Amino acid sequence: MTTNSPPAVTSLMRWSIGDVTVTRIVDSPGHLDLAGMFSTTTESVQAIGWLVPDFATPDGVGLCDFASFVVDTPTRRIVVDTCWGDGKDLGPWDEFGGRSTSFLADFEAAGFPLDSVDLVVCTHLHADHVGYNTTLFDGRWVPTFPQARYVFNRAEFEYWSAPADYPMDPGMVALQEPTFRESVQPLVEAGLVDLVDGEHRLTPEIVLEPTLGHSIGHQSVRIVSGGKEALITGDIAHHPSQAARPEWGIGADYDAASAIETRRRIFADAADRGVVVIGTHWSAPTAGILSVDGDGFRLHPIAVDGASGNM
């Protein structure tokens, strides 16, 4: 993934799922080298015509976003994933390191004071999902959301505590070691971390659901309220082309076979039952309904006006 690290995008997208409201706040947009990203195919991305123009350019460059989601339930305010963060040591991924952005100011300007957040959920602990967990203050990394509990999958947490056996790119370890030190460990020391196993209910409307493969303890966020249902994916699919071709995997997947099985299972269920899929890295319009399309699925985006969308 590449980006020029522009200022944060302040436009919001918002969806209502029964009594739950989901608001997307973008840290930074980026681009994907789709031709080189998927190690299991030689097929041209341009062959998937519906990706253009929302999710890819005509010449096959993938569009993506690094975003957080604020999930407001009747009882709790939950933040799902916290992007890259500012001022972080990202080892070999220095194009995202040491940044200074307007993301947190945009977050509060959107009507979400940092101290109003009750829970922060990380779908997994990769660097681009945990960065704003902490903020540098007087030379120390401190919790960004001071009133929140931080919810991590136990297997994910334990693995990245000592990731000696990462099976893929050794550069992942070089990236993840400073990430854990700056964006996770300070929360442990502050006594703010809750570790969960398997399926875990946060509120009557919100359940964390195991969706393993991209990482050892990956979890997605299922929302059920008022007869409506949605799923915030995390990284089960970095790009909508992986809905069209669930067999397309990336080199950073911890368990490629499990990642493929997860995509097929989750997307088949969503298509069968009309579940709204909200892609964590999917560029606007970001959310939609899936239908079966050959051996894969096609995304039918939900129309929004750039500020809000009601389902």
Image: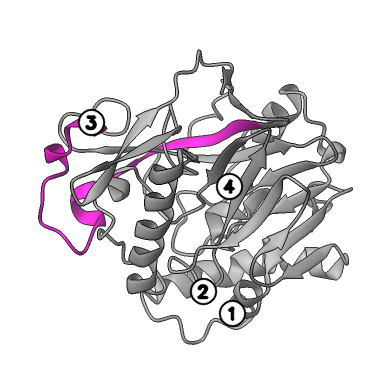
Q: Mark 4 or mark 3, which is nearer to you?
A: 3
Q: Mark 1 points at which residue?
A: 159
Q: Do the residues labelled 1 and 3 touch (CB within 8 Å)?
A: no
Q: Which residue lies furthest to the top in this view?
A: 305
Q: Mark 3 or mark 2, which is nearer to you?
A: 3
The part of the chain drawn in magenta is 22-51
Element carrying mark 3: helix
Q: How far apart are marks 2 and 1 (CA)?
A: 8 Å
Q: Name the residue under label 2.
A: 216
Q: Are marks 2 and 1 in contact (CB under 8 Å)?
A: yes
The quadrant holding residue 117 is top right
- At label 2, counting other C-alpha atoms closer than 10 Å, the crowd grade (few under 14, some 14-19, many 20 or more) is many
Q: Mark 2 or mark 1, which is nearer to you?
A: 2
Residue 33 visible in the current orientation: no
Q: Name the residue under label 4.
A: 83
Element carrying mark 2: loop
Q: Are marks 4 and 1 in contact (CB under 8 Å)?
A: no
Please report whichever mark, 2 or 1, sits nearer to the chain's N-terminal start.
1
Q: Residue at x 41, y 63 (%)?
A: 262
The amino acid type found where label 1 is placed reads: Tyr
- At label 4, counting other C-alpha atoms closer than 10 Å, the crowd grade (few under 14, some 14-19, many 20 or more) is many
From this view, report whether residue 285 is shown above or below residue 274.
Answer: above
Q: How far apart are marks 1 and 3 (CA)?
A: 38 Å
Q: Do the residues labelled 3 and 2 touch (CB within 8 Å)?
A: no
